Amino acid sequence: MSSKRIQSDPESGGGGKRRLKQQEPAGLNPLLLETKEQVSEAWSRGLEYSHEKGLLVGIQPFTHCVISNFIQSQTFLEGLKNELLKLNFHEKSNDLYKFKQSDDLQKKKGYHISALRKALFEDLRTWLSDIVGIKLESTVDLSCAKYEYTDVLLCHDDELEGRRIAFILYLVPEWRTSDGGTLDLYGADEHYQPQQIAKSLTPSWNTLVFFEVSPVSHHQVSEVLSEGKCRLSVSGWFHGSSLERPPRYIESLSPRHPHIASDEEILYDWINPTYLDVSTQVHVQDEFEEKSEILLRNFFKKEKFEMVCEALHSSDIKWERRGPANKRCYDQAEEDGLPDVLAKCMKLFCSEAMFLLLSNFTGLKLHFLATSDNNDDEDEQEAEVKESDGHEHTCSSTEERNKSESTEDDGRREGDKVGPKEVGMPGKSPEKGSYDTGEMDTTHLFMIPMWKIQNLLWTCCCALDVKAGVMNLVVLLHILLREKMKSYLPFAQKTTPWP
């Protein structure tokens, strides 16, 4: 007798089966069946429909449906919520989203998750197929997401091969629009590009939202602003035959403006002197080439930075939102009417001096006076070709020695960094304040590629802190040397002319 009592104990297998039978089922709201014909007609004809018990079909900005009290049993929902919160969540974060997501729920064996999965995969899928007129496959993506303070999911359209219906079931506490985390629906233009937010749906406990995935189904989860609430939800997609997508719209390029002619004095007015030091620029470039990014702290002089920050809060500035939202979303100030300090700041960032400085920071050729590895290799190869075409020679011991020295020089050049360098001249340096006015041998000068001369002139001018007429000096020497070089080397004619 005692053994039989043990077998019927609630902790045993037999008792476990009876306990499972007593669990609340995941029964769906009977309103779905009651309003099936009306919802189907509204969906197919693109009409609004609402029911007083909590069912809404909306058509703006694209067709969607909101069902309140989706699951009948509150006990089941509480159990489902507790079961979901015990899952392992993974941090998802990039430039499009930041939130926590569970693994695929198709393999989870908890009672409540299994019961919800069955209700979605069978009952809801059948009902949806009849409503939207699409044969939905048994394959369903299903996962759980937690959005907490500052979490967000930016504008996107959900389009992926086979996705036909997107859905989300909210399991949130009492939620207000001011808490953030709204489901924002975007309108689209004639190119299927998202424009403005046309409708925002505030999350609500036990509410299901679904819509058809299409080229215009742009939506986002706005940033969660509440520090003490968790936006918990179960979401996924029903799959079916793929829709044919329209050709991808290619935006016209933004207008580009030429560099503003300016000397290096503008840099000394705005930028921390540390970053104008050549050795600092070499260090910055080394780190940038290694990591492909760099943070330059205290880049502006303190007083300039404070003036810019204050001016940005001016009520006189007119801001315009830049989109489309699935590619960019920020406000841009209209240049007309900017405060004086902001206009000067804009001039700084568009100046030739700034682009030359950025070239030194990055090693990239952002200005035609800047150097680049490609120019170095091409000029050396072209000079070698011209020299070999000019005459034939035999390899004497002296020439072998020269070749060896040339190979060593090439090896050194190959390891050189692009951009700011310390330039050393052979021979004894003249005393401070003295200048060698004797005649100079220009043979080696005219064998130097023009871009090296240009960069050397600019680097020397910056290093000497020449603040008056530096660009005029560079322009004059550039023109004189370029015209002189034409009579010596044909490749000198290929240098980029002054604008």
Image (cartoon, helix red, strand yellow):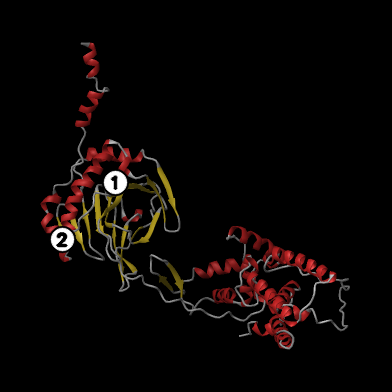
Name the residue furthest front. Answer: 394
| Image quadrant in which you'd find residue 95 | bottom left
Left or right of 472 on screen, residue 208: left
Left or right of 256 on screen, residue 263: right
The residue that disc 1 covers is 171
**Mark 1 or 2 closer to N-term?**
2
Q: Amino acid at mark 1?
A: Leu
| Image quadrant in which you'd find residue 447 | bottom right
Identify whether 195 is placed above or below 164.
below
Identify whether 352 is placed above or below 480.
above
Do the residues bearing badges 1 and 2 touch, measured as CB atoms within 8 Å? no
Residue under the image location 38 percent in, 53 percent down: 224
Q: Amino acid at mark 2?
A: Tyr
The residue that disc 2 covers is 49
- Count of residue discs: 2
**Quadrant the N terminus occupies:** top left
Q: Give the percent coordinates (x, y) of residue 52.
A: 14, 54
Helix or strand or loop: what does disc 2 sit on?
strand
Residue under the image location 30 percent in, 74 percent down: 190
Q: Give the percent coordinates (x, y) of residue 320.
A: 42, 73
